[in-house]
Image: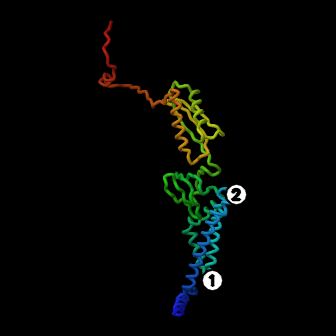
Amino acid sequence: MRELVWRDIGIVLGHEWAIGSWSISFGEIFTFAIAVWLGIAVAGATRALLREDVLPRLELPRGVPDTISSVAYYALMALGFLFAVGAAGIDLSRITILVGALGVGIGFGLQNIVNNFISGLILLFERPIQMGDTIEVGGLMGNVQVIGIRASTVRTFDGAEVIVPNADLISTQVTNWTLSDKLRRIEVPIGVAYGSDPKQVLTILREVATRHPKLLTNPEPAALFVGFGDSSLDFSLRAWTAEFETWLHIRSDLYTQIYEALAEAGIAIPFPQRDLHLRSVDRGAAEALRPQGPALSDP
């Protein structure tokens, strides 16, 4: 019974289809599929091993471990494909027509895919953008989660995951906030009422920045008198922090502490004010606007 089963399996796997001078069997298809699956599994396991265990132990520049693991992954994928072709007994000369047709397809319909593929290689080797970086491109701002061979994934601060083609990251202007370091300058504009002492305001702003534990002393915070506004004297506090991820919270703290310090010093933050000059007024409106009170009699 077992021999009959194996004989039937052999017959099925050995059955061939002929397409012109090219023939293929179930056995070749099965062997090719198993070899490709093994290649993908080995490539994925190798990338995970390098990224999670081997490379973190080495003192490599930021981004190099991801480049090494990604290159190893795609190289093993290519070797796995070649191994699958050889294991299936497929003659490479048989697929020359397919390769030629693929070349024509690349020339006409796959230009964007090839462009994104080449751009992905540039990102891997030049490393202008690395996983974990905070970037801004085309009005989109977020953290880079994955740099793939065709596209990269950027997670916005609203929680959305946006797929960005690699060609856009190469051909357009990209602002990388964390490429070389995570320093961030914080600017806090503030306006005080006319009549306030500018020197006192500048001293208060510098003292608030100096007391904050998450602001750097080098470069030191700067308090500037920037101009005369419509309703206020305008100042600006500028300081640097090394905690890029929490700079919004730090700025919020500075606003709160500046407000409390100005209130304690008796310095007011004015409301917007406008002077209204009427060139012509209706008689009834003029009577309504006239101050009410006892009429003064002529002496």
**237 or 56: nearer the viewer:** 56
**Along the line of sight, which residue is nearer the eye, 99 or 236?**
236
Please report the residue visible at 69 percent of the width from the left and 58 percent of the height from the top. Answer: 60
Residue type, label 2: Glu
- Looking at marks 1 and 2 on the same chain, the residue that comes earlier in the sequence is marked by 2
State the residue position of label 2.
59
Estimate the x, y position of residue 94 in percent, counting from the top left: 61, 82
Query: Residue, x 59% and y 54% (percent of image)?
Result: 133
Name the quadrant of the C terminus: top left
Comparing marks 1 and 2, which lies closer to the viewer?
2
List x then y, in percent, for residue 277. Answer: 41, 26
Rendered location of residue 100, percent (x, y): 60, 76
Q: In the image, what residue occupies the spot 53% across and 34% down?
A: 258
Residue 291 vs 73, above or below: the answer is above
How far apart are the two marked residues, 1 and 2, measured between alpha carbons? Answer: 45 Å
Can you tell which quarter of the image residue 143 is in? bottom right
Q: Which coloring applies here?
A: rainbow
Q: Nearer the viewer, residue 106 or 68?
A: 68
Q: Amino acid at mark 1?
A: Asp
Q: Residues within 10 Å of mark 1 (few under 14, many from 20)?
A: few
Is 179 situated above or below 2? above
Q: Position of 285 compared to 241: left or right?
A: left
Classify residue 294 as left or right of residue 224: left
- Furthest residue in direction right, as rendered: 59
Q: How many marks?
A: 2
**Helix, strand or loop for disc 1:** loop
Residue to which mark 1 is pinned: 91
Label annotation for residue 114: none
Q: Secondary structure at mark 2?
A: loop
